Image (cartoon, rainbow, N blue to C red):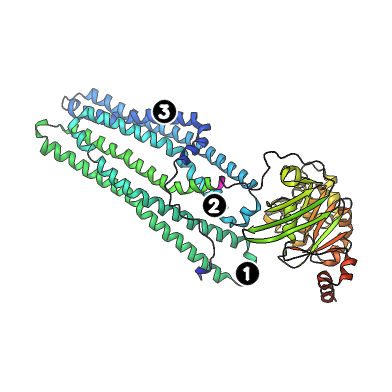
Amino acid sequence: MAGRNTYKEDEILETPFDYHHLLRAGSYIKPYSKKMILAFLISAVGGILALFSPMITQKALDDVVPAKDYRMLFILGGVLIGVFILSAIFATLRMRIMIKVSQGIIYDIRKDIFKHLQDLPFQYYDDRPHGKILIRVVNYVNSVSDMLSNGLINIILEVMNLLFIVVFMFIVDVKLSIVVVCGVPILAVFMLWIKSKQRKAWQNVSNKNSNLNAYLQENIVGARVTQIFAREEENAEIFSGLSDRCRKAWMWAVRYTNLVWPGIDTISVLVRAAIYIFALLVFVNGHYTVGTILAITSYAARFWQPIMNLGNIFNNFINNIAYLERIFETIDEPVTVKDADDAVEMKPIEGAVSFENVTFAYEEGKNVLHNVSFTVEPGESVALVGPTGAGKSTIVSLLSRFYNIERGRVLIDGQDISKVTLHSLRSQMGIMLQDSFIFSGTIKDNILYGKLDATDEEIEKAAETVCADAFIRNMPEGYMTEVKERGNVLSQGQKQLISFARTLISDPRILILDEATSSIDVQTEKALQQGLNAMLKGRTSCIIAHRLSTIKNCDKIMYIDEGGIVECGTHDELMQKRGAYYQLYTSQMDDIA
């Protein structure tokens, strides 16, 4: 059953990681560079202070305790406590600064992704489950923000800390310090071996989580359909399969991640054992004191601590590289429908529309429209009818320039719409889609979406025109009634009426109605017809309707089928032809009868 899931997984990136991604990530770090430098300096001072503690301990054990200098012992103890307190204070300050930096980076990346998503064409959303898009904006950004803030500073700090430890260690004793450093080549070989395996494993986790999130989001939105068709058990089994793949991918990746710390810790223990062996058995002429051995052992433990920290950062880095790649992949997604370099502002539209030999395909080689040509005069109403999938919605989508056409031209008032700015074009068009989307907020907010500066009087007038005012006033708080995601407190017909009001209030010059009354009952539609006539008056309109009785009075009716215009004329003209439109109309009337 789990095999029925048809989500296409993100491909595993076989190419080496492009380090230009890190350079590019620097653009998000730069605005916070001063705060990060301050955090770095605070951490550096705290770290250097902490390195004096083994020397203080050595001094106490080798000189002060044998001399029974209790006054100096008390002073050294106070200094040691002071060092620990100052280190803790500096660590706290650094943490507070970096929390602000991390949240700032999250905000900036999300803002850029969201802005880019707003510009991406319909085709991008047609090709991808929305859950996969969502996980990149939310989860992936959260994951990489710490890497770009704390991760960067920690790398510098740990490297610096390592260098200072080496210096302090060699000051105490050169020979034993060399013993400690000899463990580094062993560690290097180990880390190089695990690097490539970790990256691929965590990319696989990223892909599996993306699929799971996409399926979960889709099923939350489609919960009603699931229950209508009693698909709960089947969906639960599919989800279980996707979840199991996530679990297995995670467990496989964690195997490599969990090797890093034990590997470093094992090397650290072996090195510390080697210190005692060399100090007590090999370098016997050195007459090493207890204080010296303990100081070197302490520095050895500290020497491996930044290395283990770097290993942890390295783990985090590898885990999040896949996320960083996906984030930039989204930001780099080309905006194919955009303003041309020489685009001009669309002049106030009069409403003349022309399609000149337009050919279009959603997928290469599968044309939906073939050399479509027609003309609509300003103020004319044209209806598009025909079977499902014939290309009706495609025509109105191209008129709004939601997609780029393959061949031909679409003209408004003689101006090629590919040569004008999208904002100046779409701001003069009113588009009512079959799926009337309602945003979270008040009913008033949803109508205002069409014209943000509209007055209450304009809002109410628009609602009255489309027969929405009555039911809105009967809502608990009238126009200020809160509607949640997708307007779940509204019926489908009410959503469409609110969408009508939203479209009307923008006062468009060209009006597109794509099955805009499909969810409105016949009685309401009859009452709405007067409002529709008022909306259509003086405007060029393109109407797609499944109820042919509503488009009888259109100036022009085009029957669309197999990617082209089969018939074109008024209702009476097409009925006299007794062609495709006649057959469709009479069959629909027979069904009603």
- The quarter of the image holding the C terminus is bottom right
Is tag 1's residue or tag 3's residue first in the polypeptide sequence? Answer: 3
Is tag 3's residue or tag 2's residue first in the polypeptide sequence? Answer: 3
CA distance for labels 3 and 2: 35 Å
What's the mark number on residue 41?
3
Residue with the mark numbered 1: 227
Please name which of the two marks, 3 or 2, marks the residue nearer to the observer. Answer: 2
Please name which of the two marks, 1 or 2, marks the residue nearer to the observer. Answer: 2
Instruction: Please indicate whether residue 226 sits to the left or right of residue 379 in the image.
Output: left
Mark 3 lies on a secondary structure that is helix
Is tag 1's residue or tag 2's residue first in the polypeptide sequence? Answer: 2
What's the mark number on residue 135?
2
Instruction: Please indicate whether residue 7 sits to the left or right of residue 581 in the image.
Output: left
Residue 501 visible to the viewer: no
Residue stretch in magenta? 330-348
CA distance for labels 1 and 2: 26 Å
Measured as percent of width and height from the top left, residue 35 is found at 49, 30
Mark 1 lies on a secondary structure that is helix
